[in-house]
């Protein structure tokens, strides 16, 4: 039998409880606190000796704190004699720096994944990790759950929509959603200036006139990508634009930026904590994750 151990953040606890109850496993939350100088402290108070452990850590900003807590938690589990350690990271931070774009940069996600593996994480399960390349840097067993077809089916959309990726690199996401809905897909080409971070978009001959469009992406950070793509689509005559995005980082002003561009509804998941908002539909992805883990546990 395995035990589910969550980090001390409220969302880690919530996801840990959901996962444990879906898998019918014992659940415990780590005790966590912050010292006056900012350093973190954790303590595993349940017995984990000889038990396989599934660690659940939500990594919303400040993600660096979440990462340090996670490192301490894994070390504490090893120290306490835990068996195999699996990490469920609903959102993997730093995944967008999965390669060197400008000379002198690190492969940030590699640094993090190698550190976690070195500490004792043997298996990693992530929801939409941005790229397979990001996960290729983890030296152990890894599963990347693609929740988009599931989210598309639960979004209430039908096959009479056009599914658009706001980035050529995300075309397979749009295709997966289109397939799930029985719809057509297309893309807008996005170019990001690696020094300034400014994006520009080229929609080519894309003609969304009179169509209900769904823009699909993995991450909503500043909202710039989804807002700009939606603005272009509406300017070109789309009848309506909705968004399906896996991870909403919920940064200040981001939701408003996307909705302000004319988007009528955003469907996202609970990989990160979400605000209550009438235009936001949040889908629980733990059934998919539990399904994956159940396969290993059995
Ligand atoms: C980029 O590669 C990602 O797939 C997202 O499109 C991007 O991270 C979104 O960021 P923002 O909301 O700041 O435009």
Image: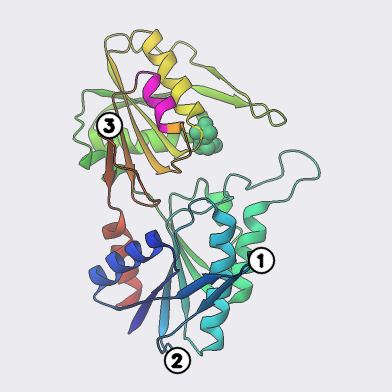
Q: Position of residue 82 (x, y in %)?
A: 48, 86
Going by the image, does 15 lie left or right of 227?
Answer: left
Can residue 86 be spotted in the picture?
A: yes
C-alpha separation, residue under disc 3 versus residue under disc 2? 46 Å
The N terminus appears in which quarter of the rendering? bottom left
Which mark is on residue 223?
Answer: none
**Can residue 289 be found in the magenta stretch?**
no
- Report the front residue among 73 and 232: 73
Q: Which residue is mark 1?
A: 37
Task: Decide: few, some or many residues near mark 1? Use Cα within 10 Å; few <14, some 14-19, many ≥20.
Answer: few
Task: Decide: few, some or many residues near mark 3? Use Cα within 10 Å; few <14, some 14-19, many ≥20.
Answer: some
* Secondary structure category for the residue under label 2: loop
Residues drawn in magenta: 255-262
Q: Which residue is mark 2?
A: 49
Q: Which residue is mark 3?
A: 279
Q: Quadrant of residue 12?
A: bottom left
């Amino acid at each position: 039998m395995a035990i589910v151990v969550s980090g001390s953040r409220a969302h880690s606890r919530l996801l840990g409880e959901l996962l444990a109850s879906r898998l019918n496993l014992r659940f415990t939350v780590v005790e966590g606190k912050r010292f006056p100088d900012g350093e973190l402290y954790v303590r595993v108070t349940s017995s984990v000796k000889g038990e396989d452990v599934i660690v659940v850590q939500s990594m919303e900003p400040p993600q660096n704190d979440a990462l340090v807590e996670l490192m301490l938690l894994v070390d504490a589990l090893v120290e306490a004699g835990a068996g195999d350690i699996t990490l469920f990271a609903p959102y993997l931070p730093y995944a967008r720096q999965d390669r060197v774009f400008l000379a002198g940069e690190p492969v940030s996600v590699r640094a993090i994944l190698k550190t976690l593996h070195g500490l004792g994480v043997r298996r990693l399960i992530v929801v939409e990790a941005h790229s397979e390349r990001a996960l290729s840097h983890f030296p152990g067993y890894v599963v990347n759950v693609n929740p988009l077809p599931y989210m598309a089916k639960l979004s209430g959309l039908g096959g009479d929509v056009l599914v658009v990726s706001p980035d050529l690199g995300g075309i397979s996401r749009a295709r997966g959603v289109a397939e799930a809905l029985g719809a057509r897909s297309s893309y807008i080409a996005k170019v990001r200036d690696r020094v300034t971070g400014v994006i520009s978009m080229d929609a080519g001959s894309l003609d969304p006139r009179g169509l209900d469009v769904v823009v699909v992406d993995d991450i909503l950070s500043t909202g710039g990508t989804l807002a700009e793509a939606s603005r272009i689509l509406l300017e070109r005559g789309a009848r309506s634009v909705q968004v399906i995005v896996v991870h909403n980082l919920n940064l200040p002003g981001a939701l408003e930026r996307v909705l302000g561009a004319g988007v009528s509804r955003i469907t996202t998941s609970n990989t990160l904590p979400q605000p209550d908002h009438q235009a936001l539909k949040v889908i629980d992805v733990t059934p998919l994750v539990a399904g994956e883990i159940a396969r290993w546990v059995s």
